[in-house]
Amino acid sequence: MSVNVSVVTNTFVIKSLPTKSYYQYDIIFGPDEKPPPPLKRQRLIHLLQTSANPKTFHPRAVYDGNKLMYASHLIPDGIYRVHGSNQQAPDDSRGWYDIKISRTRGKEVVPAHVNQLMIQGEATPETATAINLLQLLLCQAANLKNTHTKHAYFSPAGKLPIPGAPIEIWRGFYQAVRPTVGRMLVNVDTTVAAMYKSGPLMDVAMAVLDARDARQLTLRDANADDFKKLERFLKNKLINVEKNKSTKTIRGLVPGPVGRFQFNPSGTGPQTTIGAHYQAAHGIHLRYPDTIGVVTSGRSAPFKVVIPLELCTMQGGQLYKKKLPPHATASVVSFAAMRPAERLRTIRTGGGDLRSPVLEYAQSEFMQEAGMYVDPNAVTVPGRLLKVPALLYNQKRVDPRDGAWNVLGSRFYTPKKMLRWGVANFDTRNITQQTVNRTIQGLLDCCDKLGMCLFLVQDLYLLTCLQGWVGDPSSQSILAYPFTEILPPPVPAVRTGTGTPQSVKETIAQICRELGGADAVDIIIVLLAAKADDVRTFVKHFCDIELGVRSQCLREPKLQKANNQYFNNVALKLNARLGGANSLVESPVLKAVASKPFMIMGADVAHPGPGSNRPSVVSLVWSHDQHGAEYCATTRVQAPRTELIAELKQLVMNAIVMFGNKHKVTPASIYFYRDGVSDGEFAQVQDKEIKAIGEAIDEIWKVKGLEKAQVAKPKLTFIVVGKRHHISFFPPTDQDRVGDKTGNCRAGLVVDQGLAHPQFKDFYLQSHAAIKGTSRSGHYIVLKDDNFSGISQIQEFSFALCHIYAKATRSVSIPAPVYYADLACARGKFHIDPASNMDLEASTTTGGQDEEFDLERWQEAYKKIHDNVRASMYFL
């Protein structure tokens, strides 16, 4: 039974849409081969409108920072000249840019086109363009003053430097136009972004190389690894030069010593060195003349312009779009986290030196010109609190409280015996034998209490019968018989290694031989150093792909302070990996689903980083038990940044066949959860991926002769789950029952009114209780449903699946199969031999940005999971 509530959102109503029509223009920069960086492009367009041609651009047009401009009046097509810093500069000086502006072939952009989407639910190219214009009108004023992306802008106020990395984290605001049924909203949220480290370029370069001494920047060889690393990092970054405060773009580097680099300052006469030139012309004595130099001239320049590293400052606000280093994650999460009340207050009014955009909309000249008005009051919407399901353990029922529960005194619902296992220690420097012994004993104690190690009292009679000793199970003599004499505690095989690829293989293989071979081993516990990602990759590739044995890695810092809670958490993973079910969910809707054979599937696509020419990794996981708690997974690689799953038909066929082979029955229903789809891709997924699933079912029924046997095909429910949105919910001050002890809305909040998508049936479900910061709900878009009688059943079913995530004793933010698909994608790198020169994550080896992509080569290198572990939850 659900409870009706009201919640505050971080959305604001656009009370008045623009009253004007706009014309769309293409923007092309010249004369360089590549356009200037985004910050410089924005500045050049601003100078064009305010200094170079203010009459032509009145009222001012809005610019998207890339290739499009919108104006409320006609602008003559042509090439406009603008100087990057000073409009009084002579025509023959450097720094001039030609900007070609030409009107696109499209009709006038009428913002009222969005009514087609809000009222009629009809999406067209015109509505998409109109929404893009609304977004630009909303953001333009803030974008002119701040570093920004399409939907967010950032400030250096209170920035967070990342130790040991050339990056820093800035705070900012996210703002996005969101069409809903009958009205247009603005979604405003706090956010953070990584920027390249600002400040003296010497400091930045030393951070890149993790150097402690400036002498490490005296690189003489352009082919040296450190020189290449620096050049890759610094190329195309904006710097300020000390002698004239001008802004330049780094085009490359020159080896040291830069102070003795010779050039001709006048083009005629004798040459001089850079060191002598700066001393004579600017009175600057170079402190570090032996370091490398920065090249700021382009390919077409008549001579190379080189500036000493020490005279340059990295300009702030340059977005860092690569993957953050692992050690930075915890700092960024902590920096970004805000308690709900603080987050809502910041969204409404701002924080520190950064004002909220909600307060700035009324002052925006672009919104005023358009006749656009945003109500500064946050929208309140109706919601419901779903009943929290109970968890079933072996002979025990546990009721979650605030999204969490404790396994103390419980035994796993289906515990799996861990009798043959080993321990491989690859950090003998920090993990002593005493720590190994304490780890083994801690695991034995927890696994024993949870039912994984020793036979239990109710198993005793069966054991004695199998041994030829038949007796009365109620006999005192049998019950008093010591367990250790019937079945001694499992003693692991313990071995040490150095962590090299060869040592990893030899150590794990030796453990397997001692335990009777890889097929006989239940699992191997691998002990690693704090920073041992390479060793972990060796271990997982060898165990998962080559040898076919389950493994569980534990890190040294965790082991040093490990307690009962830690070993319980490890036991959760061990039991699930071994094929057990930790707990089940007591849910009426799940019970109804389980009345017939069913499968739950989760799918995800993980893309390479920006600029990387590596493949995307796709995954499909599926349940194969009668409770929806045990899953298999398979992964593939496909073309980079391709969102649709290319081989979905074959993947689904494999899953259904495996299910049928195990249960000797076909599923009556399939519940498919799809992760990682953006709003603009819903229609493509609906057209192609749902069709692929249908084709997979048709193919199996045809090949297996099920059509002739008139076996009913499974009914399909297909749901997209989004977790990267910015909608948040906050308890109203007069409804304390909605909130939990952290100030968040309680787990189980569902909202399906007030924010409804105009095209698709959708809802928001906040299924977890945040440990820190503000809880983030999942956004569920139902693209097909042939199984349930209404949206409320889908909500309850999805909420139940958020309680079966095997790695936690907490409800999670998205259904477990979606989480599992994400985990399976993240393990894609383990499928490629670490000894090869192919790496899904590296930035400098085969598969770089300038190399032609070869999918067949990647598919050949991407090895399948070993048959021994294929049916297990190896991906946890």
Image: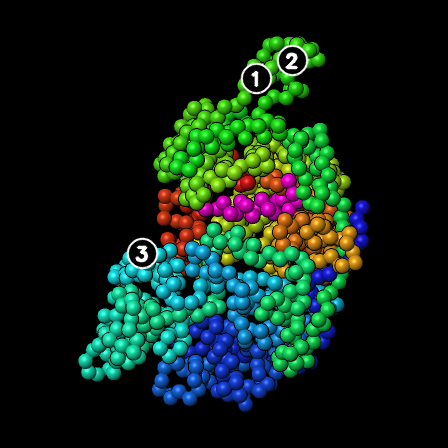
Mark 3 Cα-neighbour bin, 10 Å: few <14, some 14–19, many ≥20: few
Q: Is 600 inside the magenta-drawn segment?
A: no
The residue that appears at 49% across and 35% down in the rendered structure is 551
- Looking at the picture, which amino acid does disc 1 mark? Thr
The mark lying in front, picked from 3 and 2, is 2
Q: Residue furthest left?
A: 270
For the C terminus, give its image quadrant: top right
The mark lying in front, picked from 3 and 1, is 1
Q: Is residue 331 above or below residue 52?
A: above
Give the labeled residue for mark 3: 225
What is the image's colouring? rainbow
Give the labeled residue for mark 1: 484
Give the labeled residue for mark 2: 480
Q: Quadrant of residue 662?
A: top right
Of the residues under marks 3 and 1, which one precedes in the sequence? 3
Residue 104, position as x, y percentages in the image? 55, 78
Residue 378, position as x, y percentages in the image? 72, 66
SS for callout 3: helix
| Main secondary structure type of the part rendered in magenta | helix
| Residue 304 visible, this orientation | no
